[in-house]
Amino acid sequence: MVGERVRSAEVVGELMQLTAGLRRLSRRRLAERLAGPRLPEAQRELLLVVEAQPGIGVAAAAQALDLAGNSVSTLVNALVEAGLLARDSDPVDRRAAKLTLTDAARHRLAAWRAARATLIGRALDRAGPADLAAIEAALPALRRLLAEVRDEPGSSA
Protein backbone atom coordinates (compact mmCIF):
# COMPACT_ATOMS: atom_id res chain seq x y z
CA MET A 1 0.00 0.00 0.00
CA VAL A 2 2.75 2.48 0.92
CA GLY A 3 4.69 1.55 -2.22
CA GLU A 4 1.62 2.29 -4.35
CA ARG A 5 1.19 5.71 -2.73
CA VAL A 6 4.85 6.56 -3.30
CA ARG A 7 4.63 5.47 -6.93
CA SER A 8 1.39 7.40 -7.27
CA ALA A 9 3.00 10.53 -5.80
CA GLU A 10 5.89 10.20 -8.25
CA VAL A 11 3.46 9.76 -11.17
CA VAL A 12 1.42 12.75 -10.00
CA GLY A 13 4.54 14.90 -9.70
CA GLU A 14 5.83 13.95 -13.14
CA LEU A 15 2.40 14.30 -14.78
CA MET A 16 1.94 17.79 -13.35
CA GLN A 17 5.49 18.84 -14.23
CA LEU A 18 5.18 17.58 -17.82
CA THR A 19 1.75 19.07 -18.51
CA ALA A 20 2.72 22.41 -16.95
CA GLY A 21 5.93 22.47 -18.99
CA LEU A 22 4.13 21.64 -22.21
CA ARG A 23 1.55 24.39 -21.62
CA ARG A 24 4.18 26.94 -20.61
CA LEU A 25 6.43 26.23 -23.61
CA SER A 26 3.58 26.20 -26.08
CA ARG A 27 2.22 29.49 -24.65
CA ARG A 28 5.62 31.17 -25.02
CA ARG A 29 6.28 29.86 -28.51
CA LEU A 30 2.79 30.75 -29.71
CA ALA A 31 3.07 34.26 -28.26
CA GLU A 32 6.20 34.73 -30.40
CA ARG A 33 4.38 33.59 -33.56
CA LEU A 34 1.02 35.29 -33.20
CA ALA A 35 0.32 38.92 -34.03
CA GLY A 36 -1.21 41.26 -31.50
CA PRO A 37 -0.95 41.50 -27.73
CA ARG A 38 -0.62 38.28 -25.78
CA LEU A 39 -3.93 36.98 -24.51
CA PRO A 40 -3.73 35.77 -20.89
CA GLU A 41 -4.52 32.09 -20.43
CA ALA A 42 -7.63 32.74 -18.31
CA GLN A 43 -9.07 35.01 -21.00
CA ARG A 44 -8.38 32.44 -23.72
CA GLU A 45 -10.01 29.74 -21.61
CA LEU A 46 -13.11 31.91 -21.19
CA LEU A 47 -13.25 32.50 -24.94
CA LEU A 48 -13.08 28.74 -25.50
CA VAL A 49 -15.97 28.17 -23.08
CA VAL A 50 -18.06 30.85 -24.82
CA GLU A 51 -17.18 29.37 -28.20
CA ALA A 52 -18.36 25.93 -27.05
CA GLN A 53 -21.51 27.36 -25.42
CA PRO A 54 -22.61 30.54 -27.22
CA GLY A 55 -24.97 32.61 -25.08
CA ILE A 56 -23.59 31.21 -21.81
CA GLY A 57 -24.00 33.41 -18.76
CA VAL A 58 -21.29 34.60 -16.41
CA ALA A 59 -22.28 32.23 -13.59
CA ALA A 60 -22.32 29.19 -15.88
CA ALA A 61 -18.98 30.22 -17.38
CA ALA A 62 -17.53 30.56 -13.88
CA GLN A 63 -18.72 27.07 -13.05
CA ALA A 64 -17.27 25.67 -16.30
CA LEU A 65 -13.91 27.26 -15.51
CA ASP A 66 -13.98 26.44 -11.79
CA LEU A 67 -13.54 30.14 -11.01
CA ALA A 68 -15.38 32.59 -8.79
CA GLY A 69 -18.09 34.62 -10.48
CA ASN A 70 -16.38 37.95 -9.77
CA SER A 71 -13.18 36.65 -11.40
CA VAL A 72 -15.09 35.74 -14.54
CA SER A 73 -16.84 39.12 -14.51
CA THR A 74 -13.42 40.79 -14.52
CA LEU A 75 -12.35 38.59 -17.46
CA VAL A 76 -15.58 39.41 -19.31
CA ASN A 77 -15.07 43.14 -18.83
CA ALA A 78 -11.52 42.95 -20.20
CA LEU A 79 -12.58 40.86 -23.20
CA VAL A 80 -15.54 43.13 -23.99
CA GLU A 81 -13.22 46.15 -23.82
CA ALA A 82 -10.73 44.36 -26.13
CA GLY A 83 -13.51 43.70 -28.66
CA LEU A 84 -13.28 39.92 -28.31
CA LEU A 85 -16.51 39.25 -26.42
CA ALA A 86 -20.05 40.56 -26.75
CA ARG A 87 -22.22 40.85 -23.65
CA ASP A 88 -25.93 41.14 -24.35
CA SER A 89 -28.91 41.18 -22.03
CA ASP A 90 -30.87 37.97 -21.76
CA PRO A 91 -34.32 38.67 -23.28
CA VAL A 92 -35.95 36.50 -20.60
CA ASP A 93 -34.05 37.93 -17.62
CA ARG A 94 -32.73 41.46 -18.27
CA ARG A 95 -30.45 41.21 -15.22
CA ALA A 96 -28.53 38.32 -16.78
CA ALA A 97 -26.00 38.60 -19.60
CA LYS A 98 -25.44 36.29 -22.54
CA LEU A 99 -21.90 36.04 -23.82
CA THR A 100 -20.89 35.49 -27.46
CA LEU A 101 -17.66 35.72 -29.40
CA THR A 102 -16.98 38.58 -31.77
CA ASP A 103 -15.55 37.96 -35.24
CA ALA A 104 -12.21 39.22 -33.93
CA ALA A 105 -12.24 36.52 -31.25
CA ARG A 106 -13.14 33.81 -33.76
CA HIS A 107 -10.23 34.86 -35.99
CA ARG A 108 -7.86 35.03 -33.04
CA LEU A 109 -8.85 31.55 -31.80
CA ALA A 110 -8.49 30.13 -35.32
CA ALA A 111 -4.99 31.62 -35.65
CA TRP A 112 -4.05 30.29 -32.19
CA ARG A 113 -5.30 26.80 -33.07
CA ALA A 114 -3.45 26.77 -36.39
CA ALA A 115 -0.19 27.89 -34.76
CA ARG A 116 -0.63 25.37 -31.93
CA ALA A 117 -1.34 22.56 -34.40
CA THR A 118 1.82 23.43 -36.32
CA LEU A 119 4.01 23.67 -33.22
CA ILE A 120 2.78 20.55 -31.45
CA GLY A 121 2.15 18.67 -34.70
CA ARG A 122 5.79 19.05 -35.77
CA ALA A 123 6.96 17.83 -32.37
CA LEU A 124 4.63 14.83 -32.58
CA ASP A 125 5.90 14.07 -36.09
CA ARG A 126 9.47 14.04 -34.76
CA ALA A 127 8.46 11.87 -31.78
CA GLY A 128 7.92 8.83 -33.96
CA PRO A 129 5.03 6.42 -34.40
CA ALA A 130 5.42 4.57 -31.09
CA ASP A 131 5.37 7.76 -29.01
CA LEU A 132 2.47 9.18 -31.03
CA ALA A 133 0.49 5.97 -30.48
CA ALA A 134 1.26 6.06 -26.74
CA ILE A 135 0.16 9.70 -26.47
CA GLU A 136 -3.06 8.99 -28.40
CA ALA A 137 -3.74 5.94 -26.21
CA ALA A 138 -3.29 8.05 -23.06
CA LEU A 139 -5.85 10.72 -24.05
CA PRO A 140 -8.98 8.85 -22.83
CA ALA A 141 -7.34 8.16 -19.46
CA LEU A 142 -6.33 11.82 -19.15
CA ARG A 143 -9.93 12.89 -19.91
CA ARG A 144 -11.18 10.55 -17.17
CA LEU A 145 -8.55 11.90 -14.77
CA LEU A 146 -9.69 15.47 -15.47
CA ALA A 147 -13.30 14.46 -14.82
CA GLU A 148 -12.32 12.75 -11.55
CA VAL A 149 -10.44 15.80 -10.32
CA ARG A 150 -13.29 18.08 -11.39
CA ASP A 151 -15.80 15.91 -9.52
CA GLU A 152 -13.64 15.57 -6.39
CA PRO A 153 -15.89 15.98 -3.32
CA GLY A 154 -15.38 19.25 -1.51
CA SER A 155 -13.80 21.05 -4.45
CA SER A 156 -15.29 24.37 -5.44
CA ALA A 157 -14.33 27.62 -7.08
Image: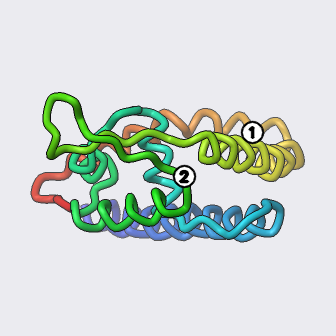
Left or right, 87 with reference to 91 = right
Residue at image point 34% right, 65% down: 3
Tag in front: 1 or 2? 2
**Mark 1 burial class by Cα count in 10 Å: few <14, some 14-19, many 20+:** some
Q: CA distance from mark 1 to mark 2?
A: 35 Å
Residue at image point 21% right, 49% down: 59
Q: Amino acid at mark 2?
A: Leu
Of the pair 116 and 11, the residue shown nearer to us: 116
Residue 57 in picture, x, y percent from top left:
27, 42
Q: What residue would you read off at disc 2?
A: 84
Task: Specify the quadrant that holds the C terminus.
Answer: bottom left
Of the pair 51 and 149, the residue shown nearer to us: 51
Question: Which mark sits nearer the N-terminus, 1 or 2?
Answer: 2
Element marked by disc 2 = loop
Q: Is residue 14 above or below residue 111?
A: below
Element marked by disc 1 = helix
Q: What residue would you read off at disc 1?
A: 132
**Mark 2 burial class by Cα count in 10 Å: few <14, some 14-19, many 20+:** many
Q: Please give the count of numbered marks on the rendered protein.
A: 2
